[in-house]
Amino acid sequence: MLAPRIVDGLIELVGGDGVIARGSAARVYECDGWTLERRVPEVVVLPRTPEEVAAVVRLLHRHGVAFVPRGAGTGLSGGCLPVAAPVMICTSRLRQIVSIDLANRRAVVEAGVVNLAVSRAVARHGLFYAPDPSSQSACTIGGNVAENSGGPHTLKYGVTTNHVLGLELVLPDGEVVTLGGAVEDVPGYDLRGLVIGAEGTMGLVTRATLRLTRTPEGVRTLLGVFATVDAACQAVSGIIAAGIVPAALEMMDQLMIAAVEAAFQVGLPTDAGAVLLIELDGAGAELDQQARAASDVCHAQGAREVRVARDEAERAALWKCRKRAFGAVGRLAPNYCTQDGVVPRTKVPDILRAIAGVAARHRLRIANVFHAGDGNIHPILLYDERDADEVRRVIAAGHEILRACVDLGGSITGEHGIGVEKINELPLLFAPQDLRAMQALRAAFDPEQRCNPGKIFPTPGACVEVTRPRRQVPA
Amino acid sequence: MNGDRPGGDATAALREALGDAVRPDFDAKFRFAAAGGAPECVVEPADIPGVVAAIDAARRAGLAVVPAGNGTHLRIGWRSRAPHLALSTRQMGRVLAHDAGDMTVRVECGATVAALDAALAAAGQWLPLDPPRAEAMTVGGLIAADRNGPLRLGYGGVRDWLIGVRAVMADGAVVRGGGQVVKNVAGYDLPRLFAGSFGTLGVLVEATFKVRPRAAALALGEWTAPTLAAALARAQAVMASDVQPVLLEAVNESAAEALGLDSGASVLIGVAGSPPHLDEQERRLAALSGGAAVRHAPERGDALLRALREFSQPADDDALVIRVGVLPTALPPVLAEIETAARRAGVVAEIAAHAGNGVAWCQLLGAPDEAALQGVAAAARAAALRGGGWAVYEAIPGELGERLDPWGFDAPALAVMRRVKAALDPDGLFSPGRFVGGI
Ligand SMILES: Cc1cc2nc3c(=O)[nH]c(=O)nc-3n(C[C@H](O)[C@H](O)[C@H](O)COP(=O)(O)OP(=O)(O)OC[C@H]3O[C@@H](n4cnc5c(N)ncnc54)[C@H](O)[C@@H]3O)c2cc1C
């Protein structure tokens, strides 16, 4: 238990309404989007300013108390589970957009600002903040920085690290440092690049300087319908071979199409093997030419049909099938879980075949909806949690799929992070000396392991035993 | 070589350990002089085990290690604090895997940027970075010295394209970070840490990049202006307009002359894409400039692009080259101060700015004496700092090299950088003292 005088000290720093010390109010914070494991934090602190964050961290440092940072709690790998930390520091009251510099296309925001709020604030000036996780109406910039989040438009625009210029970081001892900044190429190591994607293990981000991007002049959205997944994959390759970099390339397989159609009647042919959603953006003349070329590629690969959105309403309708895909899964089975593996783009047919093999071997149904352009798969494993044997098979299948991704030259996570979920799988990807170097870097920021302990790196003897499948989450 | 100095008899011992990979000749030592400090010895291993062996041998000989490619940018930074071995990766130059469909390429770090480009071009792709001296610069140098060129406005820098690295660390461990896939958040982002680390963390041996379809064509427009300030204002107008430049260079009159432009100060506007796109951009630029901006013929445009790309290289042995970074809107006052200081001191200042990024290159030439040159360099740094930015001296002639801090960086984050260095290179084996704050 945290000593009462520490709690009193926290209240003194952030006010009585900024400290949740006991009771049901703290239950809200027991897990993030990965609900397999739950743990209620002893104390939740809600600072109002970056200065208060630093003061809170200094206080905890004096008393040797570990803490876990939390944004909106939409993370999908248990990153803000208070594994070995009694205190949770939540950024939900750090909501200020500090400044917007239109001429230089920069915005400085506090860590608790919601991703979509940034784009909303600058939309009328023809600008937006490019990284667009599907959770963007809820997740925070601090969480995005910690997870190096991407979105459907990653293929063309890149991920968080490509759009964050500077960070204000409260180190685990309470010292405040600025990494990078509004100005490009600040001399020295790119510590901002190191902290982005470090899953909150190097300190607590309080402010970020973001790069804003010009809103594309035009958008074209197409939906190709194919007899087989292989044909759709050939179309992806064909589009890229034609020298086109689409803004998004998203695919669904037959099981997924059937579920979406049953749930929403959007008019997809349920006997189709795959649909491919293609979005292109850019300027006038070139955009039309690329849309024609992409459509031609689809036809050349035997597309049964290529639908082209003629206006914003039709575009929204095409995206609706993709965005609602996870919502439709409930019709197929009582429970489901997903994975976040990545393979080189040309290996997508191989990983889909591997997944089909895994499904057959374990007598499971697996639906696929994924970022085809990035090779980032999200296989959805269907099951019934009342069937203990099926649950065991789902867990084994998930692990086999990640291993297959690694064997094909890929990764075990494209955007959801390691957190506590994939700690056991990290060594599939990295050798002991790689992990040693990473942990040495962690110690350079956090020698006492007080900031988000128990995440990312396997600790000898502390193997997390997964006994239930990953929770039902969209992505 | 003097036997009393540490490493003084290193060559013989290294030869015994490493054989023909050791280059004792004077040429090699000249080529790999780091900020004017010659190495005791040069080693050019043929493979990763060779790199590991060289590091081990250096340790045993009591020498530091300065990683190198072809030495095109070794002039940057302080001299090595300790007698050192130059470890060049230039014999390791294979393109290991280019799968066009994946839009990724894995390459050995000793490959030159030009060789990589040629391999990618064969499949209609490119790594859209346009550093100087591409025919000599190695991929390792590209990453470690974080080089790019005028196209950075449209395509970003090394950190935006690098997705994986392998490096040999101080303890001889071969460490991997990132991977082969374009989307990957497993483990810490070592590739970005290595970008711009100037040979202080380890020897880069392999790198993986995202690549892109090559732009169908690039066109260059020019809009002249009476002064650099006016050129920068025009650049700002382009940024605020519907023109979509991938390159936006504002040059002063002296730089224009050096680049072979006969028009005085100018802003150069580059656009990339298909022919109809280029035509459309040309129309927009014409509308914005009231017809004042003109499009160069392709051959002339290409020649200018090449000249712009090489502008950051020292114009002669006496040049002091400064790279300045500020917000794009802060360029006009900061660059004006530098021009004024140079004029007063009788120094020629050639200035070309990546106007959309806020990064400018200044070549200070023809100084009457060292004191005058030092004064202008100091004034430039002061102006940049006042403008909220920084200034790095990337080439410092003669004796001045021992007096001027190349980096001029001093911030609380420096303490964290020192800890990062100590975490990966606890004994200070790699490029000791050469980086910011004497790291
Ligand atoms: C429906 C849904 C869809 C999703 N879609 C996507 C998607 O398309 N792409 C994608 O990448 N992700 C997606 N996610 C995952 C998730 O939204 C992202 O990882 C997001 O960035 C997490 O932000 P958050 O504010 O909720 O962070 P949290 O969940 O609160 O925290 C995540 C991690 O960040 C750390 N952290 C939070 N704030 C800070 C801070 N200020 N300083 C330091 N560390 C901090 C925490 O300790 C934790 O480790 C989705 C999630 C859901 C529920």
Image: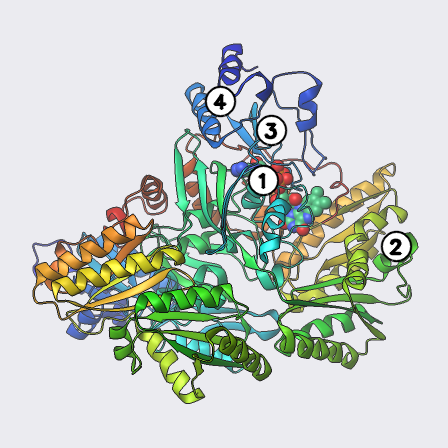
- Marks 1 and 2, how far apart at CA: 35 Å
Tag 1: residue type?
Val
Q: Check mark 4 vs ligand 1: CB closer than 8 Å? yes or no.
A: no
Query: What residue is at 90 percent from the left and 66 percent from the top?
Result: A269
**Residues at badges 2 and 3 in contact (C-beta under 8 Å)?**
no
Foreground of the two, B419 or A351: B419
- Picture coordinates of residue A322 (x, y %)? 78, 57
> Which residue appears at 57% of the width and 14% of the height?
A1
Quarter holding residue B242: bottom right
Q: Which residue is mark 2?
A: A259
Q: Secondary structure at mark 2?
A: helix
* Residue at which label 4 appears: A65
Check disc 4 and report its element: helix, strand or loop.
Answer: loop
**How busy is the neighbourhood of tag 2: few (under 14 within 10 Å), some, or many (20 plus)?**
many
Residue A82, labelled with which disc?
Answer: 3
Quarter holding ligand 1: top right
What chain does badge 3 belong to? A
C-alpha separation, residue under disc 4 versus residue under disc 1: 26 Å
